[in-house]
Image (cartoon, rainbow, N blue to C red):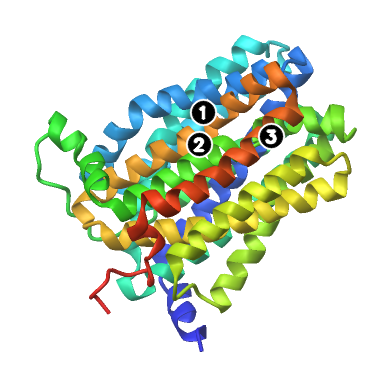
Amino acid sequence: MHATPFAELFQARAFMRFWVARVAGIMANQMLMVAVGWQMYDLTANAWDLGLVGLFQFVPALVFTLPAGHVADRLHRGRIFAASMGLQALVAAAMVVGVWQGQVSREWILALSVLLGVARAFQMPAQQAITPLLVPNALLAKAVTLSTAGMEFAVITGPALGGLIYVWGAGAVYAVCLVLLTLAAALALTVHYSHVPARHAVSWGSLLAGLGFVWHKKVLLGALSLDLFAVLLGGATALLPMYAKDILHTGPEGLGLLRAAPSVGALAMSLALIKWPLERKVGHKLLWAVAVFGLATLVFGLSTHFWLSLAALAVTGAADSISVVIRLTVMQLETPDELRGRVSAVNSIFIGASNQLGEFESGALAAAVGPVGSVVIGGVGTLLVAISWLKLFPTLAQRDHMDRPGSR
């Protein structure tokens, strides 16, 4: 029943080229994170430093993301994505040189983390806002689902490959990342669409227009802030090197599997959503997905068994996949194209805060109460957020379909 729309999607050549570019770029980024995290923990054995890697990526992302959204509404989004891939390729090249010359230090890693933060600040709004220009609205929900599946495939294979290649040294991982990022940049440059730049002048009002739009659209504000607080509190990514080494007693290959586990669950859920799309009661399903994410985080935090930990992380990924598909589809359908770059920038800030700032929060809290206490507190916090949003954002909780009420 749903095969025909996806067959049409596969025939959208610009979308599929960008899909491949995005998968290659995300895979490389995940490999970078595995190598950088393990190398930092090898250098310092300090949870605080693991948190700092996230913080040093978040701060520049926070500073540059709103201007990046404005740029995404004025310039060709495929070229912005390509430039971001190019900057990340330079970071990978610098790490290759640093490893080969024995110059990699705590400060070296933190300095290059700043550049990664700048690159991702421009990548995320362009990456999200380009999809509606490559497919018709009728295929948008399926395009988001397929993009999510591709992203999860990359997040699975990236950490797993990174962990395996790390056996030959960090320099080998960074070299492979350099190749993948260069490929992603080259593919993105071949993506063409009818580009109509926004005509507004640059001003504080235009820079903040996306923020104002989200603030007044309570459905968007609820969906984006739900993801922000849930992942900010419940994410345990920064602590995975510590869990792998000190609690689960495994090496870099085990760390790669732990980092990949959420995406195994997310990919499985994305494939299920391709066959059985979310059509009714999407608001309640979103809140339930966040609650399940919190419960699975609690299980992971308390587990001392490697395979149980992998399973718990896989469940967090499956739950997060439901959240991503609902949130991104509703966001794109609710937002006019001339604002999509800036609204995507607001979403990127929320994602960056939940991921990079969440890594810092996890590391800082782990330094105070230990890794288990940090993850358990985060899981409980995520459950409380899901319950609170049911009351704070009733229009989100009561949302029935993906598209706007009255547009069916």
Q: Image quarter for residue 123?
A: top left
Front residue of 188/222: it is 222
Looking at the picture, does residue 166 appear above or below residue 126?
Answer: above
Secondary structure state at the residue bearing disc 1:
helix
* Residue under the image location 63 percent in, 47 percent down: 294
- Exactly how many numbered labels are in the figure? 3
Residue placed under numbered mark 3 in the picture: 375
Looking at the picture, does residue 20 appear above or below residue 234?
Answer: below
- Kindly report the distance in space between the C-alpha atoms of the residues bearing marks 1 and 3: 15 Å
- Judge left or right: residue 107 versus residue 144: right
- Kindly report the distance in space between the C-alpha atoms of the residues bearing marks 3 and 2: 14 Å
Residue placed under numbered mark 1 in the picture: 357
Q: Amino acid at mark 2?
A: Ser
- Residue 232 seen in the figure: yes
Q: What label does residue 147 carry, if any?
A: none
| Tag 1 and tag 3, C-beta contact below 8 Å | no
- Residue 97 seen in the figure: no
Question: Would you call the spot at circle 3 few (<14 residues within 10 Å), some (14-19), or many (20 or more)?
Answer: many
* Residue under the image location 64 percent in, 22 percent down: 365
Q: Amino acid at mark 3?
A: Val
Counting from the top left corner in percent of width and height, residue 203 is at 12, 30
Counting from the top left corner in percent of width and height, residue 86 is at 46, 35
Counting from the top left corner in percent of width and height, residue 93 is at 59, 27
| Tag 1 and tag 2, C-beta contact below 8 Å | yes
Secondary structure state at the residue bearing disc 2:
helix
Residue placed under numbered mark 2 in the picture: 354
Secondary structure state at the residue bearing disc 3:
helix
